[in-house]
Image: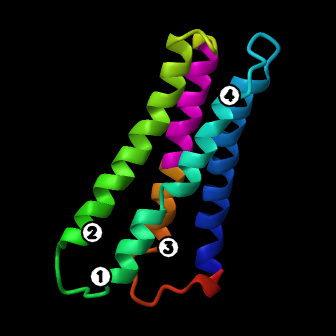
């Protein structure tokens, strides 16, 4: 179990950095608008299609399935929406463009952290949520 600790620490650190960018985009004195925090909803729901597809299509011998491809499609839509939401807010002058940049940087770091979690912990057949 010692090999599991370092990747988990690195993912926790990168998630904290991504959330820091998001909070800076909201809480700095020049920006001060908290509408970009709604991207946290996109961060929370982005892995759900993958979980559903993994549960439904448990056959590991199939390289691809319609359910898995549909899950990729929905996940892509969620991620694109998370990047588009702050741009739309900045375009209609609800937030400033500097805040939009910080939120986009936070989105990139957080979604890379989520992807890193699945690449590190979710690939093996012996994976269980109780291992950490």
Question: Is residue 32 on the magenta stretch?
Answer: no
Q: CA distance from mark 4 to mark 3?
A: 32 Å
The answer to whether residue 1 is visible is no
Q: CA distance from mark 4 to mark 2?
A: 32 Å
Q: Is residue 53 left or right of residue 18?
A: left
Q: Secondary structure at mark 3?
A: helix
Q: Secondary structure at mark 1?
A: loop
Look at discs 3 and 2 and give the one toward the viewer: 2
Establish if 118 lies above or below 98: below
Look at discs 4 and 3 and give the one toward the viewer: 4
Q: Which residue is mark 3?
A: 121
Check contact, mark 1 vs mark 2: CB within 8 A.
yes
Tell me if mark 2 has few (under 14), some (14-19) or many (20+) residues whose alpha carbon lies within 10 angstroms of its own.
some
Q: CA distance from mark 3 to mark 2?
A: 19 Å
Q: Which residue is mark 2?
A: 68
Look at discs 1 and 3 and give the one toward the viewer: 1
Q: Nearer the N terminus, badge 1 or badge 3?
A: 1
Instruction: Return the x and y of residue 96 as percentages of the image width and height.
Output: 63, 11
Q: Which residue is mark 4?
A: 35
Q: Is residue 106 left or right of residue 54?
A: right
Tell me if mark 4 has few (under 14), some (14-19) or many (20+) residues whose alpha carbon lies within 10 angstroms of its own.
some
Instruction: Write the start and end of the magenta stretch as one range.
Output: 98-111
Q: CA distance from mark 1 to mark 4?
A: 37 Å
């Amino acid at each position: 179990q010692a090999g599991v600790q370092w990747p988990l620490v690195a993912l926790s650190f990168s998630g904290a950095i991504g959330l820091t960018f998001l909070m800076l985009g909201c809480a700095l004195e020049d920006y001060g608008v908290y509408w970009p925090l709604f991207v946290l909803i996109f961060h929370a729901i982005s892995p759900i299609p993958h979980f559903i597809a993994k549960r439904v299509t448990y056959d590991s011998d199939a390289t691809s399935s319609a359910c898995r491809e549909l899950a990729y499609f929905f996940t892509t839509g969620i991620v694109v929406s998370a990047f588009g939401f702050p741009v739309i807010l900045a375009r209609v002058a609800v937030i400033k463009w500097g805040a939009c940049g910080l939120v986009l940087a936070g989105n990139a770091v957080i979604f890379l952290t989520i992807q890193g979690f699945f690449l590190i912990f979710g690939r093996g057949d012996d994976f269980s949520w109780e291992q950490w």
